Image: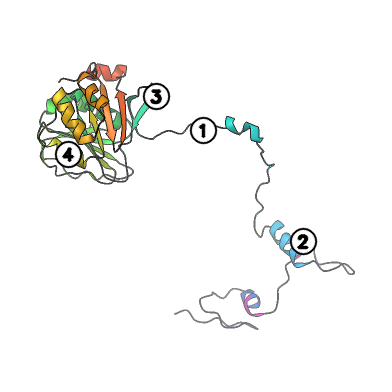
Amino acid sequence: MTAPVHGPGAGTVSGVAAVPGVAAVLGGGPVSAPTPGGPARAGEPAPSASDRARQLIRSGFGLIGPRHPRHALPLESLPELGLPIGDDGVVIGVDAESRPAVLGVNRPTPYDMVFIGGLWTAQVIALRAAATGARVAVETGRAGAWAQLVQALGVGQSGMAVHDVGRVPPLGASAGSPVLVVRDCGMRPPRGRVVSAPWQSVLTVLPYLSPVAPRLVRQARLVGVQRVSPDEAVQIGRLLGLPGADVESLPTLADGVTLWCADRDRQYVMTQATDAETGLLGTARRMD
């Protein structure tokens, strides 16, 4: 317990260290601020309270911020003031109007994606996610198909690690170290030990529509579909509530084209490889 401080003319104040002059300020009468240039001359009026405050500020008791002229914009020039604002994420291709299509995989909330399509597009997404700073963990039974990407990216921060099915360890995802888990486990992927979490998104790759696909699609927040058979297109259309035109287009999609669906939003995206990606993965293909 701090002892009270007593001073001439002062009251009792707990917790305040004894400093010369503090007692006079705390318990004495009003204290006049020093006037720059010495005391007022005889016959001159005493400075007012506002004058004393300004003098205190100008003498270093506080700071005056920089003063700049105001910038005015005529009302008729307002439409010319435009700021480009876009999504933050992985550019996975271009849409029907040749605009970049962006997939946000690094999220503060759990995010599950299902991709019914070829390994080539899934690997491009993984490669580009790593380029944005995410760690990519691949759970797969065909490690050889991912070996070239692992060799190119390395293992560690902004790298890629391949694990056997059911052998993915805890990954410690965080805002500073987000993770993308790619589950390439065939037609019937088992329930994963590592699931989506804050800053840890999961992309499940299915080569075709399988018996477990309805469950995965219902749980996913984003579904991508590449070229499938007419019968599969009808089933996928029912699962996703697609209009007839989209159902008819699914069996005719070109290699590298994906229909991405989220809630009621649908977008066709063409994934085009860079020269470096073509050197690693070859040209776009639906079949592996």
Mark 3–mark 4 CB contact (< 8 Å): no
Q: Which of the two discs, 1 and 4, sits closer to the camera? A: 4
Q: Which of the two discs, 2 and 3, sits closer to the camera? A: 3
Mark 1 or 4 closer to N-term? 1
Q: Against 263, is 117 above or below?
A: above
Q: Main secondary structure of the magenta part?
A: loop
Amino acid found under the numbered disc labelled 2: Pro
Which residue is denoted by mark 4 in the rendering? 216
Which residue is denoted by mark 2 in the rendering? 36
Image quadrant assignment for residue 90: top left
Mark 3 or 4 closer to N-term? 3
Instruction: Answer whether residue 263 is magenta in the image.
Output: no
Amino acid found under the numbered disc labelled 3: Arg
Locate residue 263, reporting x and y percent: 29, 38
The Cα atoms of the two marked residues, 1 and 4, are separated by 39 Å
Mark 2 or 3 closer to N-term? 2
The Cα atoms of the two marked residues, 1 and 3, are separated by 17 Å
